[in-house]
Amino acid sequence: MKLATEKRLTFSVFLFIPVVTFAVFVIYPILQSIMLSFHRWDGISPALTYVGFQNYQKLFANPRFWIAIANNAKWLVFSLLVPTALGLFLALLIDQKIKAESLFQTIFFIPYTITPVAVAAVWRWLFEPRNGLLNRFLIEIGLRKYMQIWIGDPNIATYSIMLSSLWWTTGFALVLYISGLRGIPSELIEAAEIDGANFLQRFRSVIFPQLLPSTIVVLAMSGIGAMRVFDLVYSLTRGGPGYATEVLATMMFDVSFNRFEMGLGSAIAVVLFLLSAVIILPYVYHTSRSLEEIRY
């Protein structure tokens, strides 16, 4: 009896620490942001003025907000499809027992270990209109007419930043898919080969269903990253030119810390939180249910 009590006490202590930490550093800031979104505050004065839903009304009437929403939607579609598909494709290639496969894994994963600000610094040089590597390459191969002001043209600036993000994030999906492929029982592949299945048939019927846990993680992390994208956009364009590359996170930063409208910035944070929850949580729930069905 005494031993059981001591075990319960030990479990309670170890559970208490992460619960308190989560409450202090996650739950409390969320509640504080929700409360602040109904007030007007400059971030300096001790007094907060209650304004009800005025911050939300002001936000929804601002065209800049809808540009940011549209760009976040573009980032969401891009992040869910392109890095995921490219990471899976590269993982399938490397899994074919090619020479120096560890070297290839390292080469593709190294960019993911670099901080976003450093990634932005590299790609700012690549995008430079006069002497940047991309435009110089186009000149050297005789395609001067295709030279672009990559992050200065409102029509292509967001897609240019996505290109730098693709180089940075593909390694994450690659490593997860490589791990998933290594975990597929060889008996399943061999049975499909004996039945005469070609590669596409093996991929559709055996490989991809076995990669569902990896896919859940990759897509969930990609979706969350797309909704809170900030570092690359702010470091490369600060939301410009104009507001062409604006996303909710850069707008929130500008409104809160450059314009000192903390209430309006908190309203943006609340909208961003709700959008992320609405988009990500149903997906995770549905895919988790699908995974349980496969297991049992």
Image: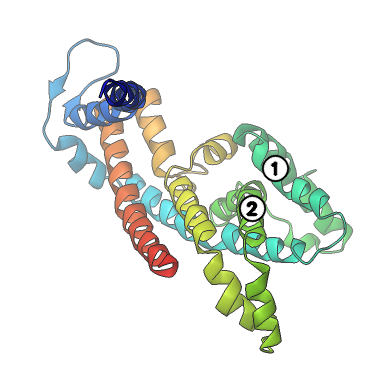
Expressed as whole percent of the image width and height from the top left, the position of residue 176 reads: 60, 53
Task: Give the residue at mark 2.
Answer: 170
> CB atoms at circles 1 and 2 under 8 Å apart?
yes
The residue lying furthest to the front in this view is 1
Q: How is the image coloured?
A: rainbow
251 left or right of 201 in image: left
Residue 111 marker: 1
Residue 121, above or below 50:
below
Q: Amino acid at mark 1?
A: Pro
The answer to whether 141 appears left or right of 120 in the picture is: right
| Location of the C terminus (image quadrant) | bottom left
Question: What is the CA distance from the residue labelled 1 to the residue labelled 2?
Answer: 9 Å
Earlier along the polypeptide chain: callout 1 or callout 2? 1
> Dot 2 lies on which element?
helix
Observer-nearest residue: 62 or 77?
77
* Viewer-proximal residue among 169 and 213: 213
Closer-to-camera residue (195/133): 195
